[in-house]
Amino acid sequence: MPDALDLLATTGQYRLLGHPTDLAGHIATLGPAPLPSDASRGWRQGFIAAVEASGLSGRGGAGFPAAVKLALAQSGGPGGSVVVNGMEGEPASDKDKLLLIRSPHLVLDGAQLLAAATEARRVTLCVPEGRRRVVAALRRAIEERMAAGCAPVPEVIAHPPDRFVAGEESALARWVDSGRSLPFFRPDKGVALQIGRRGALVHNAETLAHLAMIASTGPEAFRARGLPEDPGTSLVTVSGAVELPGVVEIERGTPLIDIVRRALPTGQPQALLVGGYGGAWVGPQDFATPYASFSLRAIGATAGVGVAVVLGQNACGLAESARIAHFLAGQSAGQCGPCVYGLPAIADDLTRLARGQADPGLLARLHRRLGEVDGRGACRHPDGAVNLVRSALHVFSADLAAHLDGVPCPHWNRPSQLRFPDSARAA
Amino acid sequence: MIRILIDPIACDAYGYCAELLPEAVSLDEWGYPIVDGRPLPPELASAAKRAARDCPRRAITLRERTSGH
């Protein structure tokens, strides 16, 4: 487990990491979670107004506005569930694990606040069983809270399967509901998820911690960090060709290169992988791009799950991308044809390309396949893979030209600079 | 106006929809239907209804839209 590399300069109150881990220390620092004595309408309105004023967007990948999600969940009526998404299936991400180990009460307070706001009856914490340190930290925190009467709604730990797609929110809600870890087809995103025919509100662990901070310190403290268009802080896991891989807490709008510098790159980076394995490669000309939704979108990237991987000079971006594509193909839930057949085909094309074994039709075929797979799954899993591969073809266009001419990648046989779970390493 | 919506989980690549409605549905190399999401011209409405009805996996939904959105 990597450490928190660097905490924000403590010139202001607002930060997620660095709070005391135990309940007494947590309360001494932030005070008890500002929960209502009874679920009064006035309290709910105040909480919703604070979430709206903060401008918080989800930190789990999609960047959906938290206030919109809350309004949607409220339409589901009372008696529902709040689900803490601690799955973090992204191989290059550690920020939610670290947050749950270091500041479990912040995350749980956020879940309790949402439960009060939506009149939910249960908080379900979803973490893979094998994450022993996270599970132990959560168990300890839940016991502390029960003993101190800080958990008005029961907090229960559940262990969905440790797979990439298991953390997709519709798959998570369905697993809690029926034990089947499969995404839904949801053409209308404006329909609330359900568990036991009641509304379910699924939030990433970091988003919940921000909600707790916003309720305690006010939306102004949140907005004092980051940019007006994309306020607040974010946790980013930095890895790859760096001396000190770990999690950094940054203000939204921090230039990408400043984020990865905190992890001490071993040399001048060749490229950065931003947003996760379903994110995008960013080339040197865009290293100064501010880490914010709008500026990343403008260069075809996304903040995604809060990941920045440094690719060093002694690596082939196309070969690394082929490894990612094979990994993502293997992580498909297996429900939709374009994902089941398209992702392995795309990964094979990319592998052949990196090995200098491209046939004359390969590049046109690869572009066609990328276009055909994009947007054709029930969930966004294939879209992320397509975006990653497209960005690789763009950022590593010089390598692409060489490999198309039959020059194989000299770095093909080097060990990957990326992280993959043991189960997927064979690819 | 009618739009075609295909449930990619239900779809099993039978391909009847592309035969019945080639103007609006093409197939990818694995036989799964591709639709562009644009509204269908009115003269294709009855063919679209048939494609939806005849889909063995009931994967096609037709959405009626009164205006542009």
Image: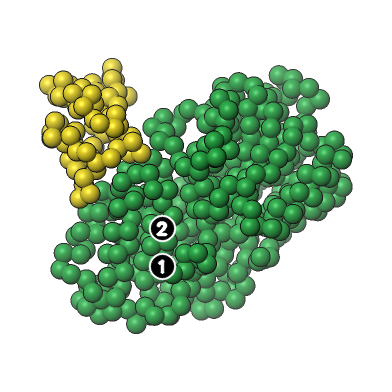
Chain colours: A green, B yellow
Near-viewer residue (A177 or A54): A177
Quadrant of the frame with the C terminus of chain A: bottom left
Q: Is residue A327 left or right of residue A258?
A: left
On whether disc 2 and disc 1 are found on a single subunit, the reply is: yes
Residue A199: image quadrant is top right
Residue A424 picture location, percent across and down: 47, 64
Name which residue type carries label 2. Gly
The residue wearing badge 1 is A427
Q: Are marks 2 and 1 in contact (CB under 8 Å)?
A: yes
Asked if residue A174 is positioned above or below residue A72 in the image, the reply reads: below
The residue wearing badge 2 is A330
Name which residue type carries label 1. Ala
Residue A343 picture location, percent across and down: 33, 55
Residue B51: image quadrant is top left
Asked if residue A242 is positioned above or below residue B68 in the image, the reply reads: below
Badge 1 crowding class, 10 Å Cα cut-off, few under 14, some 14 to 19, many 20 or more, is: few
Quadrant of the frame with the N terminus of chain A: bottom right
Q: Which mark is residue A85?
A: none
Chain label for disc 2: A
